Amino acid sequence: MALLDVKNLHVAFPRGKKGDVEALRGVDLTLEKGQRLGVVGESGAGKSMLAFAILNLIADPGRVTQGSVTFDGQNLLELSERQIRRIRGNRISMIFQDPMVTLNPVLTIGKQMIETLKAHRSISTREARRLSVEKLNLVAIPSAASRMDSYPHELSGGLRQRVVIAIALLTDPELIIADEPTTALDVTIQAEIMSLILRLCRENEVALILITHDLGVVAEVTERLMIMYAGKCVETGRTRDIIDAPKHPYAVGLLKALPQNSTKGAKLYQIPGSMPPITNLPVGCPYHPRCERATDKCRAAIPPLAHGVACFHPMHENGPYGDMEAAQ
Amino acid sequence: MTDPTNDPIIETRGVEMRFSLPTHFLSREKPVLHALSGVDVKIQEGETFCVVGESGCGKTTLGRAIMGLLTPSAGEIYFRGKRIDTMAEDTRKPIRADMQMVFQNPYASLNPRRNVFQTLSEPIRHLMPEKSAIDVRAQVEAVLDATGCDQSWQRKLPHEFSGGQRQRIAIARALVTNPAFVVADEPISALDVSIQAQILNLLSDLQDERGLTYMFITHDLSVVEHFGDRVAVMYLGQVMELAATDKIFDAPKHPYTQLLLDAIPKLSGGSFDAPRTPGELPDPVNPPPGCPFAPRCPIAQDICRAERPQLREIRTSGTMAACHLAE
């Protein structure tokens, strides 16, 4: 049985008389124990919404209108608030983008860690403190024991994110959901934090959902990949396969547009236009106005996700970018 | 593209920037933050000069000092041979029209209460007061065309646009006075991936059409590799390495440049597998006595901790590096 099984997840926000706006329009995903999944997309594609929906954290007036989120055999969407608290922050941990916002500025690091542990375990403060220092050591925070008495503002951005990771690891979770964990950090710190997350997940068999817009980070850290566009998954599969031979024209475009994949001095490949707002989606495939391969079929019907790609005219055979060049 | 015999369009000589911090009420010490400590760069006409480094390295401060948004504490800044940092505002004004800036965040850099026409005509009215209303209109229309903006945008307000469109407007604003030199401070880092390529292509098209010189400030080395002619790598207010882009990527001389290169996530994967030692910028209020990078440097020796290395040419490679041990 899969650790996490999300089926046909829909999230909608009411807009008064105009009816509902769907932020997630039917997303499926499965995650095995210890598996690392990357979720990539532009802002507004619904990647963070997916993370919140998995944890049943969609704030009013938004709500999950359809679908199920099965974690270890239980549908998280049907649990009471009391029941889900035993899972959220305990068996499933979260790491968010900005560590300065995640951490409480008026409590010491130690106090926040001990509080987290005591909320989920019936243990003594002394034991909670010992475990906390152990986790701070695990994330390579220098002089961990004395850092317990520091306030968040006394730490640098990189150290703060390490503390957030230590807190996420406190309860030995089976799944970590990391929403753009290094976007606010410098490249060198990003490399440190991502290699730390990668190592910890591998050593402890923790599953990871890594939400990011950076395909390079995804290639370094994850085994499976899901590319989202306008509230739907447009391509999913093994990270290596998608990076080497993307099938959906959007995935092809994203990879081709990277400076890493372009000849120096030549013009970058660019995807025309921008993602439509979810309040104003075109009929048919949401990507068709930007797609070079679009036909009347694409303008009329939404392509279903089949063989890992939601496209009527996916790329194939001719290698990673062969078809695209032929089309030009 | 770069002809070293030409006079540089921008030259800085020993530029220093010190900020006095508030004094603690029990202490007599006056803490001073050294944002730039002795920066010498020459930017040649028509090139794309990239400045890279981590946050706090002084790259934005250098850009702002060159633009005259900050006054250096010491040193000299020249634009086409004329010293501009001490120039009176009256004489400097026409030069400001030749030097413009694009900022990182197009959500913050555009006035939300001004429509696009007001935003774009402001620099002309202010810096070229001799222009008639008809000229202003013609110039605004021309720049909108050049930057791929629609003429119907003129009466719209910033909130009606997406991030990529706003950045186009910000670029149009920088170009409306027909400058020769543009400082672009992280112009694509606030944008979505699919939009970044559009803006980079726009910048390079405009450079080809107008012969612009760019100072491109960024933390993203993969963009630099594609876009830059020469690169200055900065660390704690100093230039650590200065070289042509391909030299920086193929044969980096400074260990800090190597560290930055190693940090780029690669599509081929595998480079994040080894654990990395944590390292951070030292405190700019109390910088270490020797090389600022010595505390993080894998090859640092006693001389590095004692003596600050000067920027020097490494043999005859054309690469300048501030490292005692580089060769």
Image (cartoon, coloured by chain):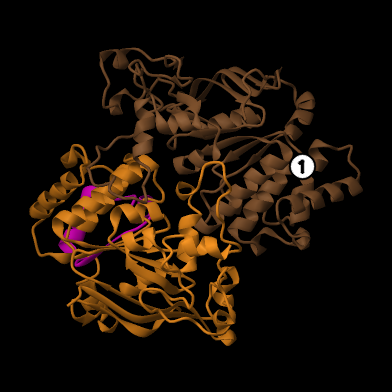
Chain colours: A orange, B brown
Name the spot of residue B50 as percent of width and height, x first.
54, 34
Q: Quadrant of residue B157?
A: bottom right
Question: Is any part of residue A291 visible from this angle?
Answer: yes
Q: In this view, does B24 lie above or below A266?
A: above
Residue at 35% from the left image edge and 56% from the top image edge: A218
* Number of marks in picture: 1
Name the spot of residue A247 as percent of width and height, x first.
42, 68
Residue at 58% from the left image edge and 62% from the top image edge: A328
**How dense is the environment of label 1, judged by Cα within 10 Å: few (below 14), some, or many (20 and up)?**
many
Question: Is any part of residue A111 visible from this angle?
Answer: no
Q: In this view, does B87 lie above or below A325?
A: above
Tag 1's secondary structure?
A: helix
Left or right of A238: which side holds A169? left
Q: Quadrant of the C terminus of chain B?
A: top left
Q: Is residue A318 magenta?
A: no
Name the spot of residue B63 as percent of width and height, x first.
58, 32
Q: Does the magenta stretch include residue A105?
A: yes
Q: In this view, does A246 lie above or below A82?
A: above
Residue ID for mark 1: B123
| Range of residues picked out in magenta | A90-119
Q: Quadrant of residue A50?
A: bottom left
Left or right of B307: which side holds B163? right
Left or right of A291: which side holds B127? right
Left or right of A168: which side holds B222? right
Give, as a three-letter code, the residue at label 1. Answer: Pro
Closer to the camera, A143 or A129? A143
